[in-house]
Amino acid sequence: MKDLGAAKKILGMEIYMVRSKKKLFLSRKSYIQKILSRFDMSSAKPLNTPSASNVHLSSAYAPQSEAEKEYMSRVPYASAVGNLVYAMVCTRPDLAHVVTVVSRFMIQPGKEHWQAVKRIFQYLKGTPDMGISFGSDTECLVSGYSDSDYAGDFDTRRSMSGYVFTLGSSVVSWKATLQSAVTLSTTEAE
């Protein structure tokens, strides 16, 4: 058996170890740069947030005219969203909500949906180094946080729920999902 030294990559994630701070950092920087190039977003203007607060996507933005349908048939929407899901898994909890939202429109995406996906790419352009870190600088307490909106899906009026679990200061599990039933109040949604 041969010692190859410290691992630099695992399952497509880069591993960075800062021994002086006793920190391990997981990132998908090279994958993010690859998908930015694949979808011609390498020179896009970086943004600080993955979605605009004033944009509420719904199926009403599905293509109506033949010209819109023709345009969207050439857009690699499903491929782009699939790449974003892969970027989110394991290292990017900050993308969970917005990627869940854009993935709802895989069947009939419209131009507004595509603009939302491109905005996520612009956010990734500005934050390629983000990831998750694990360290021994804090107590190993498990904490959980959850939240939901009320009737946030404009098509079905279902609520979106999400949770994050941390071990010390490290995020270890997260999820954002549409609830299976329509709730009648914010209390019920929570």
Image (cartoon, rainbow, N blue to C red):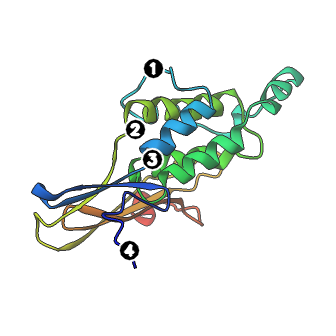
The residue under label 1 is which amino acid type?
Lys
Q: Which mark is residue 83?
A: none
Label 4: which residue?
2
**Alpha carbon of mark 4 to alpha carbon of mark 3: how far?**
38 Å
Structural crowding at the residue carrying mark 4, measured as other residues with C-alpha within 10 Å and reported as few (<14), some (14–19) or many (≥20)? few
Real-space CA distance between mark 4 and mark 2, rounded to the nearest whole angstrom: 33 Å
Looking at the rendered structure, the kind of residue marked 2 is Pro
Q: Distance between the residues labelled 2 and 1?
A: 13 Å
Q: Mark 1 points at which residue?
A: 45
Upstream in sequence: badge 2 or badge 3: 3
Question: Mark 4: which amino acid?
Answer: Lys
Q: In this view, does 142 lie to the left or right of 72?
A: left
Q: Are marks 2 and 3 in contact (CB under 8 Å)?
A: no
Which of these two is toward me, 141 or 179? 141
Q: Give the quarter of the figure containing the N terminus.
A: bottom left
Image mark for residue 95: 3
User: Residue shown at 55%/53% (left/top)?
Assistant: 86
Name which quarter of the figure residue 123 lies in: top left
| Numbered tag placed on residue 128 in the rendering | 2
User: Which numbered disc, 4 or 2, marks the residue that appears first in the sequence?
Assistant: 4
Q: Nearer the viewer, mark 4 or mark 3?
A: 4
Tag 4 near tag 1, CB within 8 Å: no
